[in-house]
Image: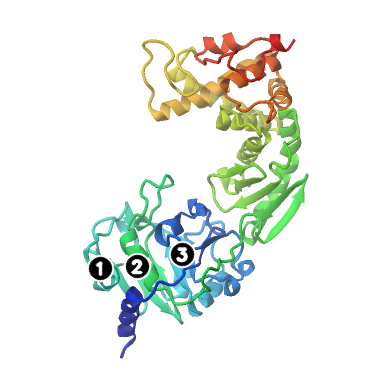
Amino acid sequence: MNRQCLWIMAACAACVAEAKQINSIVDLAHSFSFYADGRFSSQYTPGQPWARNLASFKALDLPNANANLLLLSDPQPQAPFTEEDCALVKAFAESGGLVVMLPPPGKNMFGEMLATFGIQAGEAVAGGKVLPADALKTIAGSDFSIGVRGRFSIFNGPEARVFAADAEGNPVVIAVHAGEGYVLVIPRGMISEDPGSRDRDYNAEWVRPLIEAHIVKEVPEGSHPRGRDFTRQDFRETLHGVTFHYSTYLAPYYAAMKEIVQTATPLIEKRMGVPLAGENASEVALLATGGGGFSSGPLIALAVFWENFPARREGMIEFLTHESTHSWVLPFPEVWNEPIATYVGDLVMMDAGYPEEGTRRIQEQIRRAARLDPGMTDYGLDGAATVPGARALTPGEATDLHWGKTFWILEELRKENPAVLADYFQAKRRLAVPGKIKRYGINETVAVMSFAMKRDLFGWFAQHGIKADRAASEIKDQKEEK
């Protein structure tokens, strides 16, 4: 009996056999993505344990990671798969693991990893009709269709099992044997990729059984895979009281990051006027991506390829400050949380030796809002019209208004008081105390800003379309405090 027959028999048996536990590890060390929130697992292996990996595959220790599925998405050019990575992933598959690769359309960085398993990526072609092969119908049934978003790549390999092909018969979804395990290749555009989950369970009716049919390695029931999360990467170092975590792949970027931190940290504290609140921003994880990051109190995550860092450094100063500010303002976030964080970043950029660029970015944000509301009187911070006759803004325009008007307000107040931010956050730290107040909205914001400016600002904000109620504020205004 040949190998193809054995494959079909194994696939059919998998359909009727009791489902095995799937312990998956999502690799985020080579390319950070929204899969960090467990989306792949919830959509394609629902109810099954999963873990993140932000370390090198060597540090992850795949043989002892208690996993039988490894998910790989296209690595960033700055963090490609190494020869050692390829060897370790091959060993994982050959020991019975399933490696799922999700190459994107067009040129991708999967070349060496695919070649390790004898797979070649074909030329990306315009998305068209993709048809399930008989092997896929055997596994998933016949009552389903295959969706393709945008473009996709065509693949092939020695003894590749084709599960979906284009109208001309070119393979699109394939699997190959690797020792006791498998490698499954599904183009990125055939898997859920919407950060808002509006395409939830995209193609799940056939992707789920396809994955289940290729799970060979057993893991203990009730066990959990052992990944390497944000604060368990290859290296850690404490600098200015903040502990940085980074992988082997990102070590060269950390060397440049140290200089940014040493420069920016004292400047941030000077602009904010207060030290960090509690243990906030005490951990920083570096991410292999050029866009995005997050702040969750103690942990800040930074995209190390942001704005061509480290060749250009001013963007990273803004970005580092932005994410730090989110933690600095706690325990109560700001009503203008995103724009004020970037505004502080632009001021710190100016302080760090880039005054022209910092000024340009501030003015550009204001220009976008002024195009919609020249007098800064017709809309609230949320973009809702506050005067008769003002047209409704589109969502994109409302965002521009929110950001630009925030920048304009802060700039107007800074003209009068250059230390307004420091004065504001000092007053907030003193007055906005958990237990003393329960909320921190626009009413409280204007009350605290009034303290910072040493004058009642409720009327001034109202003149500019922002309705704040002095009586409703949990923080007494300046006159009442006296």
Local crowd at mark 3 within 10 Å, few (<14), some, or many (≥20)? Answer: many
The correct choice, above or below, for 117 with respect to 187 in the image is: below
Extreme residue in the front direction:
435
Q: Which residue is mark 1?
A: 141
Q: Quadrant of residue 135?
A: bottom left
The correct choice, above or below, for 72 with respect to 368 in the image is: below
Extreme residue in the right direction:
240
Label 2 is placed on what type of residue? Pro
Q: Quadrant of residue 241?
A: top right
Do the residues under discs 1 and 2 have CB atoms within 8 angstroms? yes
Local crowd at mark 1 within 10 Å, few (<14), some, or many (≥20)? Answer: some
**Quadrant in the picture for the N terminus:** bottom left
Mark toward the start of the polypeptide (1 vs 2):
1
How many numbered dots are placed on residues in this image?
3
CA distance separating discs 2 and 3: 25 Å
Label 3 is placed on what type of residue? Phe
Q: Quadrant of residue 237?
A: bottom right
Residue at 25% from the left image edge and 68% from the top image edge: 141
Q: Which mark is residue 110?
A: 3
Q: Which residue is mark 2?
A: 209
